[in-house]
Amino acid sequence: MSTIQYNTTNIHHSFHHFSKLVHFSAILRRSNISKSRGVRTELLFKWLLTTIFNRYSIFRAEKTDAFSKRTVRNCLNDAHTNWQRLVQLVGIRLIEYCQHFTDSRRRQTLIIDDSLFKREFSKKTELLARVFDHDKQCYFKGFRALTLGWSDGNTFLPLHFALMSSCNAKNQLGLFKTLDHRSLSGQRRSQAMRKMNMVALELVDDAIATGIKAKYVLFDSWYASPHMFSELAKRHLNGIGMLKKTKKVYFRYRGREMDVKTLYAILRRSKWSTKTQYLYSPIVTFNVDGQTLPMKLVFITKRGQTNQFLVLATTKLSLKPTEIIQMYGRRWQIECFFKVAKQYLQFDQTQIQSYDGLCGHLAMVLLSYDILALSQRENTDERTLGDLFYDYGRSLPDIEVAKAISWLLRTITGLGEQLVMATEVLDTIFTEFIKALPSSLSRLLSNA
């Protein structure tokens, strides 16, 4: 794929528009980023984002007369910079901007997921650990990039992140600095050593505390435990996730305790009529810490392959099964984000060894995706063209139920070959993402 460096005018224009829209200079100051002397910090971040779009590392990037590359590294390695707040403040500004062109009745959702941040050839990287890859079912050296995103059904924006190490001492490989846990740097490292599902709830709490009006949280089967649904319910949030087909989790249905597979077998033997878009949608209950909570399940399978099925669950009982499928279909947007970030935004391609610097690099990747998401939104939604708003009455469409079901059916089909399926689905998603970009960026990206 050809890089974007041959047309830097588009990059400069996009960054200028992005910086003016989110008040980037003020956000940098609120994130403890300010200059002591010399070049303006906004110019330094512009150079960093341009380097990412050009798919260069800091070492291979083109030099500038305004500052040295050592200045850039010092900025990324600064322990006083609140990289998480930087990403969060930019995301909130963009959400406020998108809400001006979104129907108030549109359901807003938060999406939780993580991806492998590889550091296979590192030896002295701080907090390096052996982390388990659920796709390849093996361990790699690196981190887990836990990400919280926001979606209105059309636009996905990364809102928060945490670069997770391992809480198991046997899997810890990198150096560990002893820091004051009252400091920002110490709190960041302490967070990286906790359990990931607890940190995911912390990210959700931070997002809700900033005023995000989402009432639904989407996650895959790794996070879909009764404890997660219960904790979200305590926060007056509705979780929607895919359940694991395991015998370790039991639900109560018509006075009997059973796992998901047993429940599916009972429903198959019953006289319940199946639907065209799903099979069954029973209501079950589960107990967590002495509390009983109801949950609606939706069983989905492919015709002719009844032994392969998926189970979606939510604590929002008023949602129709088709609405649950449609809402869960939005979760694929974060998979699209990870694919774009890894292949085109230097997600884990960095030589930085400091944990603070790695957090800074990941924050720059998220900001790069914000710029792409903003360009995609403005080129799709004609109502952002000033007075032409009055010529358009309908909102941007949410993800269609048929498309969500299609994605789920592809998941079912590939249960035996998950890696091949994931590649095909994500390639399709990324192709549509490229088509929705501005024509100038689309032509450059399509010349790969």
Image (spheres, helix red, strand yellow):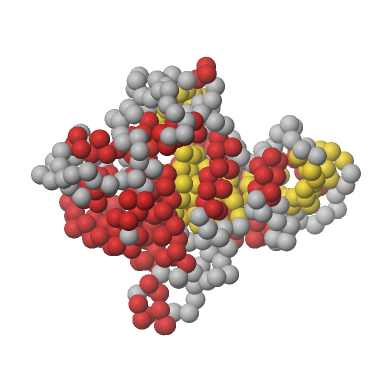
In the rendered image, the quadrant that contains the N terminus is top left
**Furthest-right residue in this view:** 255
| Identity of the residue drawn at 58% across and 63% down | 107
Counting every numbered tag in the picture gives 0
- Foreground residue, 119 or 290? 290
Left or right of 305 in this view: 254? right
Q: Quadrant of residue 196?
A: top right
Position in image of residue 383 (x %, y %): 40, 74
Q: Is residue 403 visible?
A: no
- Foreground residue, 360 or 31? 31
| Identity of the residue drawn at 49% across and 69% down | 102
Position in image of residue 271 (x %, y %): 85, 53
- Foreground residue, 135 or 152? 152
Q: Quadrant of residue 440?
A: bottom left
| Identity of the residue drawn at 50% across and 34% down | 191
Position in image of residue 144 (x %, y %): 47, 33
| Identity of the residue drawn at 30% across and 30% down | 352
